[in-house]
């Protein structure tokens, strides 16, 4: 006589068999490549395949989900005029929903199964920091991480990882210098996101500003933004302490909430907003949504911020002309904003690195090419890539928003390093390249 | 009943021996499997391993004891952070000790949540555990010094032992770790389910008043079920931290809690075999649907949301076609093949029936 529980046990075996089948059925791909010494994983006679993890869904998707399609558009444009050393760049980007557990999964899939040559522009600090150890162990080039954290500049521990955009400490220093030089004697308050982003930013500010000039420092949590009180307590405190200048290291949603709160409580400080939180197109959209159409771009008038790339509204810039052309051809349904520009500019730097890695690139020759550096592109400052530094752009220039979606430069760019005590110097005049400098990118 | 299985005679008269035999056979099959696939498949199998532990724990709570929990993702988070904090020390203890500590710490948290849960029923219980799942990740930014805020903690995972060779893939080693943990968990839970404790779980689920009259302490039984389930979630969380090398609040969102519950429902509530199917589905479905959406050239917006759509649609279809989950479907199919009416699904198995088929021994 048997019972139900015996049958359950049989079914357990059946379940095990099902697991075996499920794994075996999908297990055929990959493994083919072999160890041909002449080429590298992901490189064939006609293609170079690279991969990325991106927040296409989830909390970080608005705005940031445009970056990868924009980079892909740049690669397609380059491929159509012959590619790099005759190879076209195939860009496989996968959604991680800004969830670090998914990041580990998709990156392992890209490296182990899709056999990509390199990981490019993986987005986010909490996400990407969980795969740097793995990528360096596996010796996969990890180029141009899409995050301004200082973590990527650690050539001893992570020889295969490189940053791209200027980090937040550099940004804090440059903004701090502007305040010291141009808003001397005014009381300054900080509003900052309570994480590495905000803390690095205010560390940079503190290195420049006299402690007596700073009257209040207010951290906020991103979770506050979805609550009815928002970040009103922080701004009320800044108002009560009499801050005439508010420096805000905030994401776009927090910047928009701060501007609306200021309007509501009748507080009119000079706002100084970090680059990531000041894209006029994104802010105008958010202001309209949050206020149900009551206010828009006009609220942005007079905000001081910084840029390391030309403004998307600056149609006289040859880079913007080229980016707009690529945008209109490949991704016309996306807005032409700072995120699209960012993706295209980073993709261009990657193409330069791949070009410099030689006729038959290997993973090592790609890393060597980036360390050798010397890339010029749309950025206002040079990169700081070398054997001892894996940091990207070294500085930025100050601009002010005009309340109509555009911005005006306030002087030339500065460069510095992410050492708080290092000097801030004017950027070399010839830092910016021109489209067409590289034969593979035809303007 | 049919006699297809290990005879209940000789050495197999003992429940433990039967369960262990199945586990050893299953272990051998999995050893062959993990050694014959590529490193990424091994990584996926490692993921299945910890999902099996979590889903099996939840299926005992919901299927056998009738308590719903939308907070198991948060319990996994307790396990993951326990592992991360211990492994971050200078001389971390062996992995087995770390995982046992994950189980203990999470079981204690589970006892506290369970004590509150035992006073709540139905939607109120769901709401309370959901609040737990929503609230707990917030603690990491409140105590950012210890828990690393939104960035979380990186977990250093020890490489495979040198005796396995230099080229042994670390993914395969991790698969072995989680599969071993899954087999141990399944054996322990299978024994528990067929023991006096398991019967008291079912008695409380079916009718609290009758259970009380039969001398079962209802509240204590419910707390015990919650503790057992939480212990499994803690182990699963510790394994997740080891496999993915991290403990971050983003990995333990409400979506994870819902995914585990979906896995249990998809596999068939109350069935340990179903927990295995559910766990496989949790790993395979998103992978298959994202691969499929890459083949077809939809717009970016459609492409990025496709996996969620396929996932949801499949859940609906399975519920319509096989309301008892995949395990119910398998059971019905097995019944048809043998040319008789479908067997009664496990969740309807009543206390009396069990005590007839499984005499105390």
Image: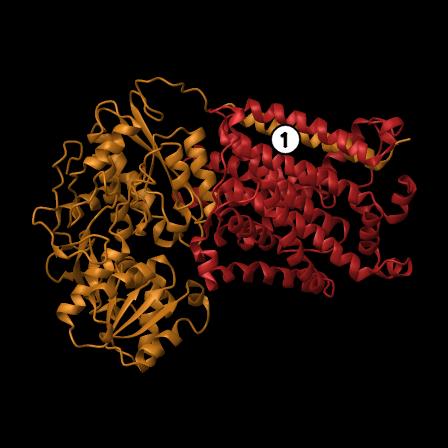
Q: Could you classify mark 1 by the number of other residues whose Cα lies within 10 Å: few (under 14), some (14-19), or many (20 or more)?
A: many
Residue A200, position as x, y percentages in the image: 31, 59
**Image point (61%, 41%), residue name:** B96
Q: Position of residue A297 (x, y in %)?
A: 26, 66
Counting from the top left corner in percent of width and height, residue B244 is at 50, 42
- Residue carrying label 1: A19
- Which corner quadrant of the image does residue B9 belong to? top right
> Chain A is which colour?
orange
- Which quadrant, please, contains the N terminus of chain A? top right
Looking at the image, residue B307 lies above or below residue A21: below
Query: Quick one: B83 or A9, which is closer to the camera?
Result: B83
Q: Tell me: A222 left or right of A78.
A: right
Give coordinates of residue A408: x percent, y percent: 14, 62
* Chain B pictured colour: red
B255 to B32, vertically: above or below:
below
In this view, the residue farthest toward the left is A429
């Amino acid at each position: 006589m048997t019972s139900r529980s015996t049958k359950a046990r049989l079914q357990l075996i059946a379940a095990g068999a099902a697991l075996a089948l499920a794994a075996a059925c999908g297990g055929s791909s990959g493994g083919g490549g072999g160890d041909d010494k002449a080429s590298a994983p992901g490189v064939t006679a006609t293609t170079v395949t690279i991969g990325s993890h991106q927040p296409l869904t989830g909390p970080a998707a608005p705005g940031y989900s445009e970056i990868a399609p924009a980079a892909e558009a740049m690669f397609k444009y380059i491929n159509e005029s012959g590619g790099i050393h005759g190879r076209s760049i195939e860009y496989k980007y996968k959604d991680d929903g800004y969830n670090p557990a998914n990041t580990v999964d998709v990156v392992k899939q890209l490296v182990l199964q899709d056999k990509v040559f390199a990981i490019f522009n993986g987005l986010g600090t909490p996400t990407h920091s969980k795969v740097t150890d793995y990528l360096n162990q596996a010796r996969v080039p990890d180029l141009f991480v899409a995050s301004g954290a200082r973590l990527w500049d650690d050539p001893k521990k992570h020889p295969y990882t490189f940053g791209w955009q200027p980090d937040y400490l550099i940004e804090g220093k440059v903004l701090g210098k502007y305040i010291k030089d141009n808003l001397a004697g005014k009381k300054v308050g900080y509003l900052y996101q309570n994480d590495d982003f905000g803390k690095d930013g205010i560390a940079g500010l503190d290195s420049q500003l006299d402690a007596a000039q700073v009257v209040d420092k207010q951290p906020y949590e991103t979770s506050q933004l979805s609550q009815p009180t928002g970040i009103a307590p922080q701004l009320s405190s800044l108002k009560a302490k009499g801050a005439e200048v508010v420096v805000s290291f905030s994401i776009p949603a927090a910047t928009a909430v701060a501007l609306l709160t200021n309007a509501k409580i009748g507080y009119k400080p000079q706002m100084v907003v970090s680059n990531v939180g000041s894209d006029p197109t994104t802010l105008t959209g958010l202001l309209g949504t949050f206020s149900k159409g009551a206010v828009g771009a006009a609220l942005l008038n007079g905000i001081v911020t910084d840029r390391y790339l030309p403004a998307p509204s600056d149609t006289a810039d040859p880079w913007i002309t080229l980016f707009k052309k690529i945008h209109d051809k490949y991704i016309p349904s996306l807005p032409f904003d700072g995120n699209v520009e960012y993706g295209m500019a980073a993709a261009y730097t990657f193409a330069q690195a791949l070009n410099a890695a030689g006729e038959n690139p290997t993973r090592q020759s790609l890393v060597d090419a980036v360390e050798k550096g010397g890339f010029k592109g749309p950025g206002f400052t040079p990169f700081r890539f070398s054997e001892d530094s894996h940091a990207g752009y070294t500085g930025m220039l100050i601009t002010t928003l005009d309340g109509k979606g555009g911005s005006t430069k306030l002087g030339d760019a500065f460069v510095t390093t992410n050492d708080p005590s290092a000097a801030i110097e004017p950027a070399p005049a010839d830092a910016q390249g021109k489209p067409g400098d590289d034969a593979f990118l035809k303007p | 009943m049919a006699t297809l299985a290990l005879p209940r005679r000789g050495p197999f008269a003992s429940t433990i021996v039967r369960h262990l035999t199945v586990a050893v056979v299953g272990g051998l099959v999995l050893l062959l499997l993990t050694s014959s696939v590529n490193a990424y498949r091994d990584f996926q199998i490692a993921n299945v391993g910890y999902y099996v532990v979590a889903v099996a724990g939840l299926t005992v709570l919901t299927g056998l004891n009738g308590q719903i929990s939308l907070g198991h993702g948060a319990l996994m988070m307790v396990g993951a952070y326990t592992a991360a904090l211990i492994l971050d020390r200078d001389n971390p203890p062996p992995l087995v000790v770390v995982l046992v500590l994950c189980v203990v710490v999470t079981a204690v948290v589970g006892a506290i949540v369970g004590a509150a849960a035992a006073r709540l029923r139905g939607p109120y219980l769901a709401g309370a555990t959901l609040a737990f799942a929503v609230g707990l990740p917030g603690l990491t930014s409140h105590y950012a010094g210890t828990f690393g805020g939104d960035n979380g903690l990186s977990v250093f995972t020890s490489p495979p032992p040198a005796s396995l060779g230099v080229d042994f893939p670390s993914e395969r080693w991790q698969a072995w770790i989680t599969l071993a943990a899954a087999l141990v968990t399944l054996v322990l839970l299978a024994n528990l389910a067929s023991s006096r404790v398991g019967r008291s779980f079912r008695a409380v689920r079916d009718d609290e008043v009758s259970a009380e009259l039969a001398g079962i302490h209802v509240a204590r039984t419910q707390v015990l079920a919650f503790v057992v389930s939480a212990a499994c979630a803690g182990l699963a969380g510790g394994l997740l931290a080891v496999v993915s090398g991290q403990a971050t609040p983003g990995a333990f969102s409400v979506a994870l809690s819902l995914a585990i519950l979906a896995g249990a429902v998809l596999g068939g509530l109350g069935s340990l075999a179903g927990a295995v199917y559910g766990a496989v589905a949790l790993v395979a479905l998103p992978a298959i649907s994202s691969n499929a959406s890459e083949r077809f050239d939809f717009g970016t917006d459609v492409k990025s949301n496709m996996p969620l759509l396929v996932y949801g649609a499949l859940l609906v279809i399975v519920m319509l076609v096989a309301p008892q989950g995949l395990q119910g479907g398998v059971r019905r199919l097995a019944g048809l093949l043998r040319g008789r009416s479908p067997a009664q699904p496990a969740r309807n198995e009543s206390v009396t029936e069990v005590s007839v088929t499984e005499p105390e021994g």
